[in-house]
Amino acid sequence: QVQLVESGGGLVQAGGSLRLSCAASGDIFSINSMGWYRQAPGKQREFIAIVISGGTTHYVDSVKGRFTISRDNARNTVYLQMNSLKPEDTAVYYCNIVLRGRDYWGQGTQVTVAS
């Protein structure tokens, strides 16, 4: 069993910051990557950021320079620091891990950015 527990979402004014956390537990030996996706109302889920084993990170262009993904291997936790938030960042944010070739998802956490 693999569990992903997210936290840190909420309501923030435009220009503000939030930090999302996702803690993985269970049979999680040898995680390949940890990342974040989001889904806005009426839209498809989209990739936001990923950190792969070794520490390499990738971001979607719309968040580069504003969001930072990091990973604490000792705690099996991935973070998403979100700065300079915009109303268009409003969405449900999902944690994702790839573990031995399989995708696992968190339950999602709502981020709402008020203008």
Image (spheres, rainbow, N blue to C red):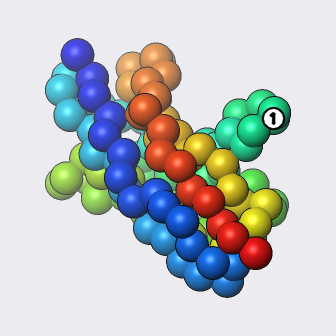
Tell me if mark 1 has few (under 14), some (14-19) or many (20+) residues whose alpha carbon lies within 10 angstroms of its own. few
Q: Quadrant of the N terminus?
A: top left
* Residue 53, above or below 106: below
Quadrant assignment, res 43 = top right
Query: Would you place residue 6 above or below residue 66 in this image?
Result: above
| Residue that numbered label 1 is attached to | 43
Q: Quadrant of residue 113?
A: bottom right
The percent coordinates of residue 27 (x first, y second) are: 20, 23
Q: In front here: 49 or 83?
A: 83
Residue at horizontal 53 percent and vertical 49 percent from the top: 110
Question: Does 44 appear above or below 19?
Answer: above
Nearer-the-camera pick, 42 or 81: 42
Point out the image quarter for the C terminus: bottom right
Q: Residue 39 placed where, x, y %?
A: 68, 39
Residue appearing at x 31%, y 40% in the figure: 5
Res 46 visible: no
Amino acid type assigned to the residue bearing label 1 in the image: Lys
The answer to whether 61 is drawn above or below residue 22 in the figure is below
Find residue 47 and report its horizontal and vertical position in percent: 69, 42
Secondary element under disc 1, as helix, strand or loop, is loop
Q: Is residue 75 left or right of residue 13?
A: left
Where residue 36 sits: x, y (%)?
A: 55, 46
The quadrant holding residue 71 is bottom left
